[in-house]
Image (spheres, helix red, strand yellow):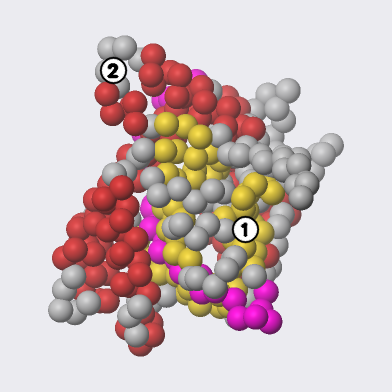
């Protein structure tokens, strides 16, 4: 039988294992990864980072996720929060999806409090793996941002930006759809935060749209993360990155587990383009805005389903 030719587009894959042996005296490894990271975020708005955590640690975290979502609903509902996505989330708009969040998870007490709420008799294995994992993801987040900032000669701003960042570790489960249900796990959206680090289990299902509107099915890989540029990052850089639409499509009849490490600008400072990023060739794209106020607008307007929320909210119209 003749098979139809397959055009498989893939995400750029960047190997981070070499950075472990990186010697600051000899920056050639750093410099070469930096070039790849910036190109990937500019052209795709995302890339796959391989070899960031050990397979063992990833496996303990996968087990932890399953244990967590297997808890009785009453227990999961104990995790409440005023802050979006920090509590237990279920919504009729995304019936296959449920999530739980841990704020700033590299502070041990935040993980311990969460663990004690879910397992009053304690679960040290859960909290230890989540702590170790979050520490690694926090390091990766800073490395990627440093590389982008250096690529644009903005290195002097990095520390200040890192100080005004909050983090959220979001743990997610998608159940398999019933025969008559839609297979959409999460609708097409962009991330409005700064940057997201995603991991999906072997079920796969994450799809990312290219600049040419083609969908890439992200291969599930036990030992890698997908880094996704968010709207806030692109506002800082006045449009120099691509912010990709993405979604989750469920295949087969198995539940899918995934996890996202979101960096989010604190509400105390305005989201705005760096002065150096605005010039005749790159006129200002977004007016400065308060992230908290934007989120209120975003959720009122139907949230994750309003595809161009940021442009509507604070986009500078042409000619103005
Ligand atoms: O579950 C996933 O792989 C993607 C989740 C996602 O895109 C999000 O939470 O913004
Ligand atoms: Fe997303």
Residue drawn at point x = 28 percent, y = 17 percent: 24
Q: Quadrant of residue 22?
A: top left
At x 54%, y 73%, the residue is: 253
> Residue 156: x and y, percent?
41, 25
Q: Is residue 194 above or below residue 176?
A: above
Q: Position of residue 180 (x, y in %)?
A: 68, 82
Dot 1 or dot 2, earlier in sequence:
2
Q: Residue 171 placed where, x, y %? A: 40, 64
- From the top left corner, tell me how far across and down residue 70 is, in percent: 35, 78
Q: How many labels, in total?
A: 2
Disc 2 crowd rating (10 Å Cα; few below 14, some 14-19, many 20+) is: few
Outermost residue on the bottom side: it is 74
Q: Residue at x 65, y 80 (%)?
A: 179
Q: Residue furthest right?
A: 319
Magenta region, residue range = 153-182
Disc nearest the viewer among 1 and 2: 1
C-alpha gap between disc 1 and disc 2: 38 Å
Q: SS class of the residue under badge 1? A: strand
- In the picture, measured across the screen, residue 113 lies left or right of residue 148, that is left
Q: Secondary structure at mark 2?
A: loop
- In which quarter of the view is residue 82 placed? bottom left
Instruction: Indicate which disc residue 247 carries.
Output: 1
Query: Above or below — where is 319 with respect to 292?
Result: above
Residue denoted by label 2: 24
Q: Magenta stretch: residue 258 in it? A: no
- Residue 122: quadrant of the picture: bottom left
Disc 1 CB within 8 Å of nearest ligand 1 atom? yes
Quarter containing the C terminus: top right
Q: Is residue 319 above or below residue 152?
A: below
């Amino acid at each position: 039988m003749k098979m139809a030719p397959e055009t498989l587009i893939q995400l750029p894959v960047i190997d981070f294992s070499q950075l472990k042996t990186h010697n600051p005296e000899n920056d050639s490894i750093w410099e070469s990864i930096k070039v790849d990271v910036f190109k990937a975020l500019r052209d795709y708005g995302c890339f796959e980072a391989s070899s960031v955590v050990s397979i063992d640690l990833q496996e303990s975290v996968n087990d932890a996720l399953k244990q967590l979502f297997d808890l009785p609903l009453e227990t999961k509902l104990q995790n409440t929060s005023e802050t979006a996505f920090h509590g237990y989330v279920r919504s009729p708009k995304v019936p296959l999806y449920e999530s739980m969040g841990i704020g700033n998870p590299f502070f041990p007490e935040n993980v311990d409090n969460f663990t004690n709420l879910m397992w009053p008799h304690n679960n040290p294995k859960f909290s230890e793996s989540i702590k170790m994992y979050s520490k690694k993801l926090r390091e990766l987040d800073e490395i990627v941002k440093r590389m982008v900032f250096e690529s644009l000669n903005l290195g002097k701003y990095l520390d200040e930006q890192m100080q005004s960042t909050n983090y959220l570790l979001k743990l997610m489960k998608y159940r398999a759809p019933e025969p008559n249900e839609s297979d959409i796990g999460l609708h097409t959206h962009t991330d409005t935060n700064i940057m997201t680090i995603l991991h999906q289990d072997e079920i796969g299902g994450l799809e990312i749209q290219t600049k040419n509107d083609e969908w890439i099915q992200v291969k599930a890989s036990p030992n890698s993360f997908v880094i996704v540029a968010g709207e806030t990052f692109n506002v800082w850089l006045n449009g120099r990155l691509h912010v990709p639409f993405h979604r989750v499509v469920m295949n087969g009849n198995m539940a899918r587990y995934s996890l996202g490490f979101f960096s989010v600008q604190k509400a105390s400072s305005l989201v705005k383009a760096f002065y150096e990023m605005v010039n005749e060739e790159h006129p200002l794209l977004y007016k400065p805005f308060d992230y908290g106020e934007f989120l209120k607008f975003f959720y009122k307007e139907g949230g994750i389903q309003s595809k161009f929320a940021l442009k509507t909210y604070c986009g500078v119209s042409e000619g103005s």
